[in-house]
Image (cartoon, grey):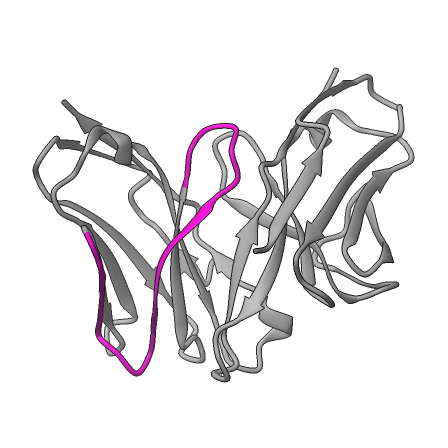
Amino acid sequence: DQQVKQNSPSLSVQEGRISILNCDYTNSMFDYFLWYKKYPAEGPTFLISISSIKDKNEDGRFTVFLNKSAKHLSLHIVPSQPGDSAVYFCAASAIGGSQGNLIFGKGTKLSVKP
Amino acid sequence: SQTIHQWPATLVQPVGSPLSLECTVEGTSNPNLYWYRQAAGRGLQLLFYSVGIGQISSEVPQNLSASRPQDRQFILSSKKLLLSDSGFYLCAWSVSVGVSGWYEQYFGPGTRLTVT
């Protein structure tokens, strides 16, 4: 059973507009969430994270929102740029969880059109 | 600063041949280390993790094994490759986030393995 779900396998957005990537989780013990960006044939790179004590974390064009009651988080990219085209993975973990292990979603492929 | 290396970058191997992928981390000591596989069109599957030399935990039953002969070295192996072992293999290490008990993982560049 998938504990972290990214239900949209792909998303297409026009350059300059907002990209919203969504992620849902089922395990109420998760309390730390991360977003990674992955280009083809490269390793994922860490983008931004949020802990359960916050509902928003911002870093430049990237903002992550957490809705604990809905077990939902989202990544907003504003404005979207063609270089943002990549696969985005959502991941979750819990304090005391197995040695820092993260549970990943299956990813959403973002395409930003010029 | 910390860096993580993986080699080779690409590998084409026939079915039944052995496999050895290597991962090394620089700039940190006693890291937690991880091997993931990303099959075509799929997410990241955790294969093994290690919290110290000689300590390996397997997440899924499979044709692969892992070893950690040195603190910053993690090796993924197979005695006989299967077609289903094809994929993109990623090594990662984790760092704790302050004193919170949370961790972030950082990935190597990956190895593209094609079993023919």
The quarter of the image holding the N terminus of chain B is: bottom right
| Apparent side of residue A87 relative to residue B4 in the rendered image (left or right) | left
Residue B8 image-quadrant placement: top right
Magenta run includes residue A112: no
Residue A34 horizontal/vertical position (percent): 39, 61
Classify B52 as above or below A111.
below
Task: From the top left corner, tell me how far across and down residue B86 is, in percent.
Answer: 68, 28
Q: In this rendering, is residue A80 above or below A91?
A: above
Specify the farthest residue to the front. B1
Q: Is residue A1 visible to the viewer in this orientation of the structure?
A: no
In the shown orientation, is residue B2 left or right of residue B52?
A: left
Residue for point 13% across, 47% down? A78
Q: Is residue A78 visible?
A: yes
Residue A66: quarter of image: bottom left
Q: How many marks?
A: 0
Residue A107 placement: quadrant? top left
Q: Is residue A56 magenta?
A: yes
Point out the stretch of residues depicted in magenta: A38-60
- Residue found 20% across the figure and 54% down from its top: A60
Query: Which percent across, then down, holds residue B5?
Result: 67, 41
| Quadrant position of the C terminus of chain B in the picture | top right
Q: Residue at x 74, y 24 (%)?
A: B83
Q: Which residue is at the front of the view, B23 or A75?
A: B23
Where A87 falls versus B96 (above or below)?
Answer: above
Q: Give x and y (percent) for residue A11.
A: 23, 36
Q: What residue sits 68% from the left and 53% below the top?
A: B26
